[in-house]
Image: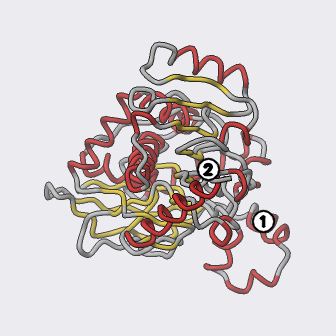
Amino acid sequence: MGRFAFVLHPVSMADFHRKFGILKHLPDHWVERGFRLIPPWVGSEISGIVSSTGASADGLFVVLPWTPRVLMETPWPETLRRLEQAGRIAEARGAQILGLGAYTKIAGDRGVSLNERLRIPVTTGNSYTAATAIEGALLGAERMGIAAAAASVTIVGATGAIGGACARVLADQVGELVLVARDAARLGELAEELRDAPAAVRVEADLKRAVQPADVVICVSSAIDQILEPTDFRAGAVVCDVARPRNVSAALAGTRDDVLVIDGGVIAIPGQNMDFGMNFGFPPRTAEACIAETIILALEGRWESFTLGRDISARQVREIADLGRKHGLRVAGFRRFERALAEGDIEAIRSRAENARGRRNSW
């Protein structure tokens, strides 16, 4: 049996409130400041993971009680020290690999320095996050009647690890690829890397202009605050929001019933008695793709730093996707702002989008 550990942290104040209800009565900055002083702890034991191959794994969550804002504002040496504390807990509890979640893999150098300090390998989960973001986005496009080979796909946060990986894979599958991010130099380097790809690749400095005409939008920006509003998308667009905290405003759920927004990277974990041992905001037996990558490597018995740093190859993305399928992990249907979407919901969104486009064409 493989054993893993995963570093979990609150991505919003709602996570604190779910665990410690009394904290909702305190100012957010008080809570953040207080928990910044608390070292990592074991949040829960994870049990009952059984692959379709018969392999099994267990593990533990190590909680670092820092929000994204605290992680991004804290000097890197202090953040690294806290992550090393979390890693030492994992080693002491018998873990053979450590996964990083959400902003713990964005802060600093995306696991590279931590991996050098620990006795066990570190993986960020970004390869499987990219793989499942692509899978979810293309499945959504299919449901909305969008042919991938002719689709215009915009990647928000294209110069990040996940965004770059998505671009490298999708450049062989779609009609047009629009890359947008804040770092113009890195955008240019990525576009140059993909210049011979089948897709027409271009960069866009203006976020709104990049998103508004797109058939499919994949959001993987590391922005702490929401950066996309309901009016930013065309009718019939598919938006896969992988970022946590979200890139897309929750107001879209109540104002745009003609856009298919899906939560990226929600993965069903195999095992009839699978139990994460704590409520971290997902339905039972499901998890984010970054957690799932760590689980896949534990089931496979591959004690290696599969994903580190910023640059992720298309080969890595395809390999971890194949391993996920081998062990019975899968995208857990479609969810929209934490609510499950039935097939009828998607058909209704598609119908309203077609009506909206028809009205515009008649003007």
Q: What's the residue type where badge 1 is placed?
A: Glu
The residue located at (39%, 42%) in the rendering is 147
Nearest the eye: 38 or 48: 48
- In percent of width and height, residue 83 lies at 60, 49
Q: Quadrant of the N terminus?
A: bottom left
Q: Is residue 21 visible?
A: yes
Location of residue 112 with respect to 282 vertically, above or below:
above
2 and 1 marks in contact (CB < 8 Å) = no
Please state if 133 lies on the left or on the right of 185 as rendered. Answer: left
Q: Which residue is mark 2?
A: 361
| Residues packed near mark 2 inside 10 Å, few (<14), some (14 to 19) or many (20 plus) | few
N-term-proximal mark, 2 vs 1? 1
Nearest the eye: 330 or 256: 256
Q: What's the residue type where badge 2 is placed?
A: Asn
* Helix, strand or loop status at disc 1: helix
Q: Residue 4: which quarter of the image?
A: bottom left
- In percent of width and height, residue 221 lies at 65, 44
| Residues packed near mark 1 inside 10 Å, few (<14), some (14 to 19) or many (20 plus) | some
Residue 32 marker: 1
The residue located at (61%, 49%) in the rendering is 104
Please state if 291 lies on the left or on the right of 58 as rendered. Answer: right
